[in-house]
Amino acid sequence: MISAVLRIVLAPCLILMTAGGAWAQPPQAAKTVGLIAAMSDVLTVTTLGKNTITGSERRFSIESWKVSERVAAAVQRHLGKGFKVQRIPAPAGAFITLNNPGFFAPNFDENYGRMVRALAGSQKADFYLAITPGYSRVDRGDLIARGLGVVRSENLLTKKDVVYSLVLYRVFDAQFQMVRSEGAMLGKGSSVDTIVGPNTVLEGGKRLPADARIAAEDGRTKEMTMDLLDKDLAATLPKLFARK
């Protein structure tokens, strides 16, 4: 009689124990992530002459590429079940209004954080993830490339096209304090790098058409920039919330 009563009392406790004898932990609630995907909808084609100072830029709309939507879909795929992603509306290229980071913009990080807070508004989350255009110096000079584009070198020693996809990833906590930063942010690279960040170099017969507009509209340009973007997202997103 006593053993039967004990079995009845202990049965619920046994159910909560793991095979190793440890108490089973209740499932943790998913962390909410407020996502600000604000990549630019512009492709920049930069042509360099004898030096970076004489470079000329032309910008072309790539709104139809829906880059930010592509980024948002990748976040949903790569963050995993432990996170609940909530998209926060943001104008395409909202962060392009900030001055380029560097010596002449010492308050870049502060202004970036203010932009995140302003866009988030009253939407509450455990974390805020901003994915925006990244930055690289061109040939380690003063000219700065950002977001998606092509750098064309036309000097006597170098004739090549560099297709790039630069992304900056920043994670903020619930109080809008930055806790992690990854991606293209004026890295130094080596002396031979035209762009520091995801890029593809085209030389000889593989180069894009000489006309900047035709180069921007060339199907290979979209294919290469999107491939670089997808690979960068797949490599970076899983580690943003990983414990160091």
Image (cartoon, rainbow, N blue to C red):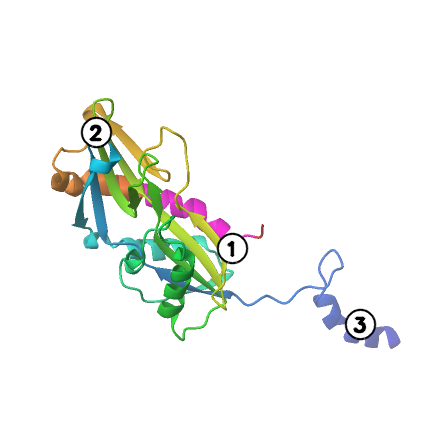
Cβ atoms under marks 1 and 3 closer than 8 Å: no
Residue 153, x across and y down, in percent: 23, 31
User: Disc 1 to disc 2, how far (Cα)?
Assistant: 44 Å
Secondary structure, mark 3, is: helix
User: Disc 1 to disc 3, how far (Cα)?
Assistant: 44 Å
Residue 78, x across and y down, in percent: 44, 52
Question: Looking at the image, is mark 1 or mark 2 earlier in the sequence?
Answer: 2
Q: Which dot, 1 or 2, sits closer to the camera? A: 2
According to the picture, the residue beneath numbered tag 1 turns out to be: 241
Secondary structure, mark 1, is: loop
Q: Is residue 170 left or right of residue 51?
A: right
Q: Is residue 241 magenta?
A: yes
Cβ atoms under marks 1 and 2 closer than 8 Å: no
Label of residue 191 in the image: none
Disc 1 marks which amino acid?
Answer: Phe
- The residue positioned 41% from the left and 37% from the top of the image is 188
According to the picture, the residue beneath numbered tag 3 turns out to be: 7
According to the picture, the residue beneath numbered tag 2 turns out to be: 50
Q: Nearer the viewer, residue 147 or 84?
A: 147
- The residue positioned 72% from the left and 64% from the top of the image is 23
Q: Is residue 145 magenta?
A: no
- The residue positioned 40% from the left and 57% from the top of the image is 107
Residue 120, x across and y down, in percent: 39, 69
Q: Is residue 195 left or right of residue 46?
A: right
